[in-house]
Image (cartoon, helix red, strand yellow):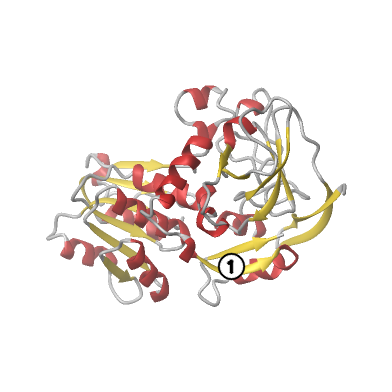
Amino acid sequence: MTMMKAAVFVEKGRIEIVDKPIPDVGPNDALIRITTTTICGTDVHILKGEYPVAKGLTIGHEPVGVIEKLGSAVRGYQEGQRVIAGAICPNFNSYAAQDGVASQDGSYLDGERCRCHGYKATAGWRFGNLIDGTQAEYLLVPDAQANLAPVPDGLTDEQVLMCPDIMSTGFKGAENANIRIGDTVVVFAQGPIGLCATAGARLLGATTIIAVDGNDERLAMAGRMGADVTLNFRNVDVVSEVHRLTGGRGADSAIEALGTQLTFEQGIKVLKPGGTLSSLGVYSEDLKIPMSAFAAGLGDHTIRTALCPGGKERMRRLMNVIQANRLDLGALVTHQRKLDDIVEAYDLFANQRDGVLKIAIKP
């Protein structure tokens, strides 16, 4: 077999299944037969034309699969082994990676401009952004030695499906929030990433986690993930309620997981002096910082952003959390679809129908 099915970006508003050649394997690569992948909110941004990628690019960045073929230089793995790879797949050779921000690994673009973006700020994100992604029958994983992580025996595809992106991103949001034991944390938006941020805040020791969303089903799921208080923004003034709940002190940290001006502003407004806003949203417009809530820049606030950490060690640690029964994210997989039905799956996911959180796509 030399051809495979793949979901490609055709134009704004169109992703279609096409036949593409199965990739050739270079010495540092691995060819993965995809057993499960999924659709991310970032993929919806691509579909809507809000984030530019090349026409004909295979979309998707969350792989679970089996090693079909290994490059000649890849050691420590074997064909037939179940693996995942992070959505961000750095080679760890760049200045950025060696400076501690491997998600910004852009060494393979040194000296040239990205054909779509003209910048390197998301260069560590290759699958479905700069190279063909995971919504296909096969995936070529570059720098496989650095990025393949074996799936522990006994864990299902659905249990580890969140690790490559959603879990890693949500946990990074909590890690960036400077959470200490006993803290109060507000998490804005309880989509899959926000739910993982809620779970991460609990694991880091926050004792009052306030989850905010406009969907009661997602707020109920937030309670399962560790939220102590749930606020439906349709029914309550979130900023006032957070200050009431904290006795006027404000929250120690806020995590913004949607990517809108409103939630970004509210994230700052709920903070105590010296609090931290951890921003995970993908923003499609310029942001404004509210001067009074930001104390005109004199409030000792911290704003931190993040791109999903990748690499095999990050993936190993995340799967350890699942294997140790500290967290079960299988509940976030609410639907399953075949790869052939991915266009319908995009419509379901983008419009948040039928209580959808994540869809397991099975080639």
At x 48%, y 49%, the residue is 286
Tell me the quarter of the picture where residue 362 sits.
bottom right
Query: How far across and down, in percent of the image, does residue 339 sit?
Result: 72, 62
Residue at point 39%, 56% (across, down): 327
Q: Residue furthest right?
A: 2
For residue 217, side relative to residue 131 (left or right)? left
Q: What is the x, y in percent for residue 276?
A: 28, 45
Residue 235 visible? The answer is yes
Residue at the far front: name it.
Answer: 153
**Closer-to-camera residue (162/237):** 162
In which quadrant will I find the C terminus?
A: bottom right
Position of residue 67 in the picture relative to residue 247 (left or right): right
Residue furthest out toward the left: 247
The residue lying at 44 percent from left, 42 percent from top is: 306
Crowdedness of circle 1 by 10 Å Cα count: few (<14), some, many (20+)? many
How many numbered marks does the figure carry? 1
Q: Quadrant of residue 121?
A: top right
In depth, the one of 231 and 226 nearer the eye is 226
Instruction: Give the percent coordinates (x, y) of residue 28.
Output: 69, 28
**Label 1: element kind:** helix
Look at the picture and state if 211 lies above or below 320.
below
Q: In this view of the protein, can residue 287 be seen by the observer?
A: no
- The spot of residue 241 in percent (x, y) is 22, 67
Q: Give the residue type at disc 1.
A: Phe
Q: Is residue 210 left or right of residue 17?
A: left
| Residue indicated by mark 1 | 349
Q: In the image, is residue 131 above or below residue 157?
A: above
**Residue 24 versus residue 175: which sits nearer the camera?**
24
**Of 96 and 74, the residue lying toward us:** 74
